[in-house]
Amino acid sequence: MKRESTRAKREAVIGVLLFGLLMLACVIGFWTLCTIPGLPKWLFILFAICGVFCAALTLPALWALRKRFQEIDALEDTKSVTLYKEENIMLLVNIDYIPGKEFEVLGMAKGTVVQSKNFGKDFMAGMKTLVGGEITGYTEMLNEARQIAVKRMVDEAEALGADAVVNIRYGSSAVMQGAAEVIAYGTAVRFK
């Protein structure tokens, strides 16, 4: 599991580095445009502002990298305890009854997450669409998102005092380019 978190951190750093290189190229391009002899002052100001804006975009990217590292560390801590063991904590079934058990319905339990891949993985996924085949980066992203959504659903069911979640369903949707929402939901029940 430690190897997975190291790989995820490395991928995040690569994504930020690629974005940083793109922004550096933009800054250099705008700076070069500013050095054109006889350039009108208003155009010089416009190019300078665009260059500064591109340079400033690296700060939110670094902030996002820091937040991603925190997410990866938190996910690593959670994985080692319960993320892959939800079924040991609580009975999870996708049918609307449990053979041989009577229960009372407590309400709906749900868990949702919006997940994305880094700039580098997104770029490589775009290249993969040229030739076809499975885009493993997105497969991994959706598997991780589904696990997080199930964990959150189990946490919500536990808060209701449930012993099981029945009639579990999954849903997913594209929120934006390269980001998907995954939801897990079901009926929280307590055994009689």
Image (cartoon, rainbow, N blue to C red):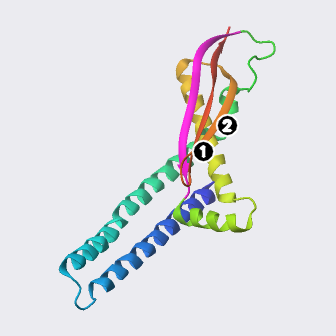
Residue for point 42% across, 53% down: 67
Nearer mark to the viewer, of 1 and 2:
1
Judging depth in this view, the residue of 97 and 32 nearest the camera is: 32
Q: Which residue is mark 2?
A: 85
Q: Is residue 111 magenta?
A: yes
Q: Which residues are magenta?
A: 103-117
Disc 2 secondary structure class: loop
Compare marks 1 and 2 and give the one earlier in the sequence. Answer: 2
User: What is the tally of numbered marks visible in this picture?
Assistant: 2
Q: Quadrant of residue 44?
A: bottom left
Q: Is residue 142 magenta?
A: no
Q: Is 63 left, or right, of 181 in this rendering?
A: left
Q: CA distance from mark 1 to mark 2?
A: 15 Å
Q: Which residue is mark 1?
A: 145
Residue for point 62% across, 40% down: 172
Disc 1 secondary structure class: helix
Magenta span dominant secondary structure:
strand
The residue sitting at the bottom extreme is 37
Judging depth in this view, the residue of 12 and 46 nearest the camera is: 46
Q: Measuring from the top left, give residue 14's x and y in whole percent.
A: 52, 69
* Amino acid type, residue under disc 2 in the picture: Lys
Q: Is 59 left, or right, of 81 in this rendering?
A: left
Identify whether 102 is placed above or below 125: above
